[in-house]
Image: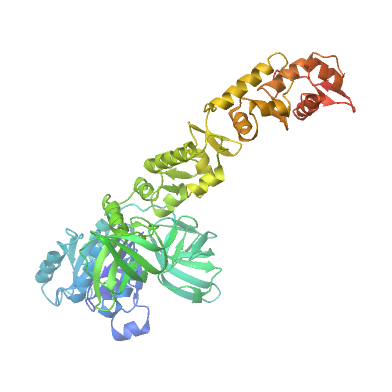
Amino acid sequence: MQVIATAGHVDHGKSTLIRALTGMEPDRWAEERRRGMTIDLGFAWTTLRSGERIAFVDVPGHERFVTNMLAGVGPCPAVMIVVAADEGWQAQSAEHLAALDALGVRHGLAVVTRADLAEPELALTQVHGHLDKTCLAGIESVVVSGRTGQGLPELEAALARLAATLPEPDTEGAVRLWIDRVFTVAGAGTVVTGTLSRGTLRVGDELDMSGRRVRIRGLQTLGEKKEKVSATARVAVNLRGVDRDGLSRGMALVTPEFWMPTRVIDVRLNAGVHHRGEAVLHVGSAAVPVRLRFLGGDTARLTLSRTLPLRTGDRGLLRDPGRREIIAGLRVLDVRPPALRRRGAAAARAAALGEVGLPDAAALLRWHGLLRGSELTAMGCPPGGSPVVGDWYADPGHWSSLRSRLADHVSRRPALDPGITVDAATQLLALSDRRLTEALVAPPLAVEGGRILPAGGSLPPAIAKAVTELTADLAEQPFNAPTAERLNELGLTGKALAAALRSGAVTSIAKNVILLPGALDRAADVLARLPSPFTVSDARVALATSRRVVLPLLERLDAGGITRRIDNDLRICRPQDGSHL
């Protein structure tokens, strides 16, 4: 299916043409039929001889209903511009074309109607003269009469050619269905309609709507019930979990977690703008009052009156509701822009935005530094490459800067300082996930005992000298741990001892029981040669040490599964696989 919106001045025969093509009445309200003009959106459909199914969104042409017109055109991939031969190009023809150009609509068909009332050549010349200045330049044109049927076969053929040129929709992508109509069906409940431009809807799917979860109870497209509907399509969705009063045109049903609701966006405008005061953002079927702040060049920041699920690359337009004129078309650049607090921040932001046309994941990372892959996808730019840790992606320059800041902070700490904890470093670097801090640690840094320290750094000379003396003391009797007095003589107390322990130059068996690295493995080898079972005294003699040392040493071996106590004083060595502790 393809969905095509109409556009054109009031009473130029749009609805008559739709009736002639489809045999359906697009004007739904009695008031519309009584007044002879479309007030709200109308819908009709037909199947072409080519087999292509076409759904039409018939929009109002009167200037007072431009907001309704934009709600219908916004989600549609193509447009049929209608101009009456007997009246030619008119004011609303121009406003509708300006809106289509601002929204970047590039696929369409120009139709000159009421060819039975006037020669169409002048109207055709006017139409193409105006179209040639827009993104719809070069589209095909057809002359018809909805009343007599003149040119309808040619129009149908042109519609088939137009449908064949439209890009293939992404049926696997995340859904965003802009709601353009809400009503209640007896026995079914709340129903919303919209133009599904991407993704697939299935009965039973759970969707998000303004932070509320709703479930699809039923689906219908072109009057037929379906279990699933894929883009592009006009679709009616019967919802469970929400009342009609909680819904309105301009809201959107989206795939949960795949869109980023936002109230502040940075955009690029497609025209020089000098507007001040109120403005309304039109995107999808939504019309939202905004506050406009120019950043510099062609960029601006919009603060929305309510959140919308937007992505980088979305198109919209700004309209002045007082003067009833279009201010500019726009492209969304960033849906989570940084705050502008410092002097010159707006100009710097404009310069950053001006470096790219349409941002990709690399540009978003350059602006934000760090983002989760899920955030990049929700912002409209799925990540490439590999994450730095978990689902986190980083701008290379920002990541290098963080690593340098961390290394600089650690290097400036006193030599005997116990280092900075991972959590403190996370706070220092203003990171939201301690895993990022751990991933930043690389030589010359290391994480030991939950603290970030210089990796393999040499000990201060005084401590290194003390360790050398201790090594000499233990050369003959490696298990004869120095007394507290001897440690004090060597200067291995407090921060000095902590530094020696962190460096791995010595190991602690218990409080004030300090031995050289590998002491436990060496003790296990000695004890393994004793007859089993052996006593504490047997171990003390074999290790040539005191009870002060042997008792905590045996407890460590017990805890490591090297030895096992079989009664109050007897132990055995468990068979090992070649390794100890």
Q: Is residue 489 left or right of residue 543?
A: left
Q: Is residue 244 above or below residue 4?
A: below
Q: Is residue 239 above or below residue 549?
A: below
Q: Is residue 187 left or right of residue 484?
A: left
Q: Nearer the viewer, residue 487 or 211?
A: 487
Q: Nearer the viewer, residue 108 or 360?
A: 360
Q: Residue at x 22, y 66 (%)?
A: 273
Q: Residue at x 47, y 38 (%)?
A: 412
Question: Picture coordinates of residue 90 (x, y %)?
Answer: 17, 75
Instruction: Give the quadrant of the N terminus.
Output: bottom left
Q: Residue at x 84, y 21 (%)?
A: 572
Name the image quarter holding residue 126.
Answer: bottom left
Question: Picture coordinates of residue 358 (x, y %)?
Answer: 30, 52
Instruction: Give the quadrant of the C terminus.
Output: top right
Q: Nearer the viewer, residue 362 or 483?
A: 483
Q: Nearer the viewer, residue 22 or 317?
A: 317
